[in-house]
């Protein structure tokens, strides 16, 4: 397998060299042609909590705009556009029974499922629960307007589990009323069809999007369907009072192909994992949520915001055993979740001794109530458990809630110097009870004060340097405290949240942002993050991972992003990340493995590269681009054993889209060919999988075509 991948990499070196040369040669030119100073004139809010351009922020933050998200993209997976952001490792698992894996600067990479270690918001509503676990299946990419990705010490001001922050914002309607039907079709019988209705009339702005996605999947037993609806209503956007109402729903049904062992990867890379078909492994999810935000302008220098939200999530999953034991106890699990929260925020600007000062004061409350049940499973069907007249084997309630307060101050001691300081206090409570009295469960409280400070210096109007430091905090998730060990005993029935401590991380960052007049811009940053008590796997019992606190870990790295405007209507983007994520002090698991200092944290490639070269007409009516995506090898197990090593890869994609006006219709067509050289590679890994089924292979060459048309009334 490795020889095959290396041979593909070697064959593609000439293409990579040519593309990289084209990406970098534009510094010799000064003609400003396409996408001038891309994103620099757009506004972000995630770092300072006041609107400012990315160049003005003393933090590593990237904005992905609507064109990068929707034009020439399949609009199915959030990883499609996140791959261009430095510091971010976002990959499509090719398995819709599992959420997209996202890590930022190595945080969240060792999550067994979903996303953790980072904070995610969708139109202001947290997609991250108070315990730090995030779910992303409800993100409706077809109606996303832009995304902000915040990295580094600033993210600690968002509370528990903030190794980075992803803020996602839906579109707003344009003046008048418009309807946009859209559709796409591609490899593996993959289709998506939907319609958007939007408008802005009489101080009322609205968006409604509904779509259906279906695929047979690139692997055996990976078919899936997903329905998304997303609605956004803004009342009074032009006045002092603005009310925003948000609602969205997702209905997902997906087969689970499971991961592959190294041997299976060699013999049948697009096949299903052990017992996936015979046990019909699968998952269904229904999530419904809504929220309302009130933004009130008090005067020209102050305002306050109130946000309230609530939601439910119901999922049912059939798993496969590593043996042929029938029935498989807890081989089917259900989760019924209800969650809600409130946030209040007050902002004002003032002058103190002729120094401009901006201040944000806020309070946040969230709660999550989970009802979890385990069933006995025989080949994908529920059966009575041994010695019982019911299929129910476990029945428990879990609860997480938080109450946070935060303060952030920014001031300018001089025209060139900006200083920001912040403080957040987070109080998180995790608790649970077993309705079958199989174990006693206690309540655990976690409290932490998280400070942050940064300073930037405007060297000249085109160059800014900045530095920052902050203390981050990660509590265990509800999933991690379900299975804990006491002393030398390790059992799936001995659960005690007091056995796990929260992890703390001190982060440092040094960055430089530069504008190249009439050419482009680039950003670069060096980061260091040292963690104590990081939560890692201790053992795996009957498919249930038991966790412990490790000693010390570290994440050190370098990021670079550059945009260049080239002659002949060409432009390019280049993003590179180096991340050294390692254990920095030995620890031991109950299976007898010693994880030595210097071992790599699973799921983190040391090198990651995204490159793009595109030709675009000045009116943006035609865009043709080539993309390059590369990553070095990464491990899937804490032990870094050879059988868990996923080799590096380099793949290339082509895309093209065109826009026309036909009568009153605004029409866009696109075509995309991914992995044009049909490279065989592993795009994702399953961390610490018990049966060594670590690998989730990516598809070979595949394509998609699409069409959307907007009719304004």
Image (spheres, rainbow, N blue to C red):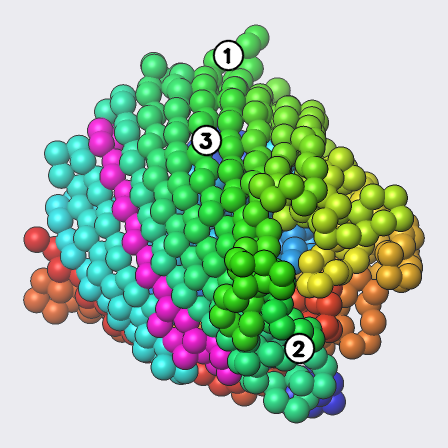
User: Horizontally, is 681 left or right of 382 in the view?
Assistant: right
Quadrant of the rendered image containing residue 213: bottom left
Distance from the alpha carbon under mark 2 to that under mark 3: 44 Å
Quadrant placement of the N terminus: bottom right
Work out whether residue 451 or residue 22 is closer to the camera in this orientation and state it: 451
Asked if residue 59 can be seen in this view, the reply is: no
Distance from the alpha carbon under mark 3 to that under mark 1: 34 Å
Which residue is the site of mark 2?
A: 324
Work out whether residue 95 or residue 681 is closer to the camera in this orientation and state it: 95
- Percent from the top left, x then y, of residue 688? 73, 64
Q: Secondary structure at mark 1?
A: strand
Magenta part of the protein: which range?
Answer: 214-238
Label 2–label 3 contact, CB within 8 A: no
User: Horizontally, is 122 left or right of 406 in the view?
Assistant: left
At a point 51% along the width and 38% down the height, the residue shown is 369
In reply to whether residue 224 is colored magenta, the answer given is: yes
Question: Residue 351 has which mark?
Answer: 1
In reply to whether residue 317 is colored magenta, the answer given is: no
């Amino acid at each position: 397998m490795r020889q095959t991948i290396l041979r593909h990499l070697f064959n593609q070196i000439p293409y990579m060299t040519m593309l990289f040369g084209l990406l970098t040669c534009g510094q010799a030119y000064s003609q400003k042609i396409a996408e001038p100073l891309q994103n620099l004139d757009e506004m972000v809010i995630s770092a300072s909590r006041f609107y400012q351009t990315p160049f003005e922020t003393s933090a590593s933050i990237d904005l992905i705009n609507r064109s990068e998200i929707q034009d020439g993209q399949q609009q199915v997976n959030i990883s499609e556009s996140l791959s261009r952001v430095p510091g971010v490792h976002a990959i499509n698992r090719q398995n819709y029974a599992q959420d997209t894996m996202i890590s930022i600067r190595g945080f969240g990479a060792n999550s067994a499922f979903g996303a953790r270690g980072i904070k995610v918001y969708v139109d202001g509503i947290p997609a991250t629960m108070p315990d730090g676990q995030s779910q992303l299946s409800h993100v409706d990419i077809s109606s996303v307007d832009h995304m902000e990705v915040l990295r580094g010490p600033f993210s600690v001001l968002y509370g528990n589990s903030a190794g980075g922050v992803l803020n996602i914002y839906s579109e707003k309607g344009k003046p008048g009323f418009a309807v946009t039907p859209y559709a796409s079709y591609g490899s593996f019988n993959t289709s998506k069809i939907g319609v958007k209705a939007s408008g802005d009339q009489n101080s009322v702005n609205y968006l409604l999007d509904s779509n259906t996605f279906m695929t047979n999947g690139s692997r055996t037993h990976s078919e899936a369907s997903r329905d998304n609806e997303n609605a956004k209503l803004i009342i009074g956007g032009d006045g002092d009072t603005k009310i925003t109402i948000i609602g969205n729903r997702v209905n997902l049904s997906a087969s689970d192909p499971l991961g592959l062992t190294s041997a299976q990867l060699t013999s049948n890379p697009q096949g299903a994992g052990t017992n996936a078909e015979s046990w019909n492994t699968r998952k269904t999810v229904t999530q419904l949520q809504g929220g309302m935000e009130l933004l009130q302008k008090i005067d020209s220098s102050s305002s306050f915001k109130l946000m309230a939200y609530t939601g439910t999530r119901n999922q049912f999953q059939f798993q496969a055993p590593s043996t042929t034991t029938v029935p498989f106890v807890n081989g089917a699990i259900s989760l019924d979740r209800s969650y809600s929260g409130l946030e209040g925020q007050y902002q004002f600007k003032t002058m103190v001794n002729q120094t401009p000062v901006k201040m944000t004061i806020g309070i946040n409350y969230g709660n999550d109530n989970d009802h979890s049940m385990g069933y006995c499973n025989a080949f994908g069907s529920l059966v009575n458990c041994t010695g019982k007249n019911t299929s129910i084997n476990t029945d428990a309630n879990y609860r997480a809630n938080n109450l946070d307060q935060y303060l952030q101050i920014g001031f300018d001691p001089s025209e060139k110097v900006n200083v920001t300081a912040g403080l957040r206090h987070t109080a998180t409570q995790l608790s649970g009870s077993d309705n079958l009295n199989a174990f006693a469960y206690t309540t655990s409280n976690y409290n932490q004060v998280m400070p942050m400070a940064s300073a930037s210096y405007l060297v000249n109007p085109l160059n800014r340097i900045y530095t920052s430091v902050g203390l981050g905090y990660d509590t265990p998730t509800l999933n991690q405290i379900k299975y804990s060990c006491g002393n030398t005993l390790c059992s799936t029935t001995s659960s005690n949240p007091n056995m796990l401590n929260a992890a703390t991380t001190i982060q440092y960052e040094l960055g430089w942002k530069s504008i190249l007049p009439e050419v482009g811009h680039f950003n670069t940053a060096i980061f260091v993050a040292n963690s104590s008590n990081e939560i890692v796997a201790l053992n795996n019992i009957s498919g249930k991972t038991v966790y412990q606190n490790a000693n010390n870990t570290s994440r050190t790295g370098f990021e670079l992003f550059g945009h260049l405007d080239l002659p002949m209507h060409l432009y390019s983007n280049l993003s590179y990340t180096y991340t050294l994520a390692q254990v920095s002090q030995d620890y031991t698991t109950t299976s007898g493995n010693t994880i030595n200092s210097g071992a790599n944290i699973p799921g983190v490639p040391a090198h990651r590269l995204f490159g793009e070269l595109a030709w675009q007409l000045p009116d943006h009516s035609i865009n043709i681009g080539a993309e390059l995506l590369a990553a070095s090898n990464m491990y899937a197990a804490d032990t870094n054993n050879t059988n868990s090593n996923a080799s590096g890869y380099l793949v290339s994609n082509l895309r093209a889209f065109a826009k026309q006006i036909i009568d009153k219709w605004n029409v866009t067509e696109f075509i995309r060919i991914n992995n044009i050289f049909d490279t065989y590679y592993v795009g994702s890994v399953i961390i610490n999988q018990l049966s060594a089924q670590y690998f989730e292979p990516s598809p070979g060459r595949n394509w998609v075509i699409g069409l959307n048309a907007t009719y304004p009334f």
